[in-house]
Amino acid sequence: MIDLHHPHALWALLLVPAFVVALAIDGHTRRRVLEKIGHLPQVQRMTATVSHAARRWKAVLLVLAVACLGLALAQPQMPGVAHLEPRRGLDLVVALDFSRSMLAADVYPSRLERAKRELDKLIDGLKGDRVGLVAFAGVSMSYPLTNDYAAAKLFWRDLGPADIPVGGTNLSGAVRDALELLENGKQRHRATKRPPAQVIVLLTDGADTEGGSLEAAREAARRGVKIFSLGIGTSGGDFVQVANEDGGKQFIEEDGHPVRMRLDAEALRQMASVTGGEYVHVDPERFGVDRVQQAIAAMERDEEDGRVVQDPDEAYWIVLLPALALLIVEALLGERRRARPAPPSSPGAAGLPGLVGPAAMLLALVPALVGFDFFERPNPEVEQGNRLLAAGKPDEALAAYDRALAARPDDPAIHYDRGAALYAAGKMPEAMREFQRAAEESHDPSLRADALYNLGNVQLKEQKAK
């Protein structure tokens, strides 16, 4: 079965009737010019060597060649050979502290902002690993394991302490929520296969207000999960200002005195130790994730979770080669009857210019055949929506995608982008419909795969694990 990668390029076939009309007008114009030259019998004797049949055949060959070139622009493809693309990776949950103490500025620009940059660096360095996220203060918010690193980082890009409904620092709750994400991911592996290594990266200042963190770490050790704790801040600490009811700012106080938010490294060191992990201090001069990246690089990866990939085979040559043959025959086919042998130099002198036109037409196709798309242009509304979504403004991005859909309602790529915005806005049923439509209507295997993958993320978010 042959599929067209750019079916919209078939509009180029409209050049065929236009070409036919142009050739007809050219023939009519030639006759009118000959009639005006002078005495008709004399003109007929002068043009007696012209073969009108050969001229018509040249026109037919040229029209057929243009039709073949139009089909080549649509980039026909045939199903390729399916192969299993292995994906080696471990399961990693990153837990980030969003308590108010993380607003301390003893690490520039603040503990929280520095922590986000550290974790973005860690996630960017992953290759095939699945990552889940936990944002915690007094309670936790979680994001399931995924290979979509860009979507994962959007989860907490604009998140702050005010977005967590309960204050405090519940380290034990964060670890247990991370263990739940890992357990859900573990169920994907068959009992006959050993699951990959599982790791929790805990980035906090360690000021545990709820207790029980060491017991949660022991539970992680019993499950074979290692904890790498990253302590951020300085031993001297810093005071933290927060917004008050009057719109101003005030220090976090205890018994009427500002509280200095210090790093509690000992608790984090103990949590890492009982699981066989490591404690790393993140200070203003040192990047803490480097050591974590080195440690997890040697851990066991899972090779079972591969995916079947079927790369299409390009088939444009099926119509491009006939087009080349037609153009060469058209260029070599003379318009005059063979009255006497031509001088030895004539065929070369006449044939070379005759091939210039076909060569120019084939060269014009080269950009399309190496991947350049003449027909698709960036949609400004889609680009604006992408920028807004990356900035953490899904509602505004959704409005931009809606404007793009008004102009191109059947574009599966825009439906996919709209689904991403709905997902970020928490509108799961609508996001599910958009991802489903993109998967069903797209002719791009990569887009279909992404749509189906994110459809699975929505189902998981809706507690439909099966």
Image: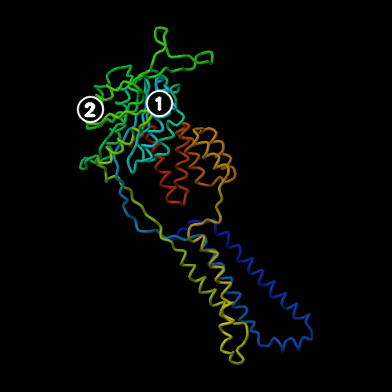
Locate residue 12 relative to residue 103 in the image: left or right.
right
The part of the image, by quadrant, that contains residue 56 is bottom right
Q: Residue furthest bottom?
A: 340
Amino acid type shown at disc 1 = Val
* Residue found at the very far top of the displayed protein: 255
- Tell me where residue 256 appears, x and y as whole percent: 42, 7
Any mark on residue 107, and which? 1
Q: Left or right: where does residue 27 sit relative to residue 90?
A: right
Q: Is residue 247 above or below residue 323?
A: above
The residue depicted at 42 percent of the width and 39 percent of the height is 150
Between residue 368 and residue 285, name the one nearer to us.
285
Dot 1: element: loop
Q: Quadrant of the N terminus?
A: bottom left
Quarter of the C terminus within the rendering: top left
- Other-residue count near label 2 (Cα within 10 Å), few / some / many at <14 / 14–19 / ≥20: some
**283 or 224: nearer the viewer:** 283
Residue 213 vertical position relative to residue 452 in the rendered view, above or below:
above
Is 90 rendered above or below residue 256? below
Instruction: Tell me the residue at 77%/81% (across/down).
Output: 35
Q: Position of residue 249 (x, y in %)?
A: 50, 16
Label 2 sits on a secondary structure element that is: helix
Q: Which residue is mark 2?
A: 273
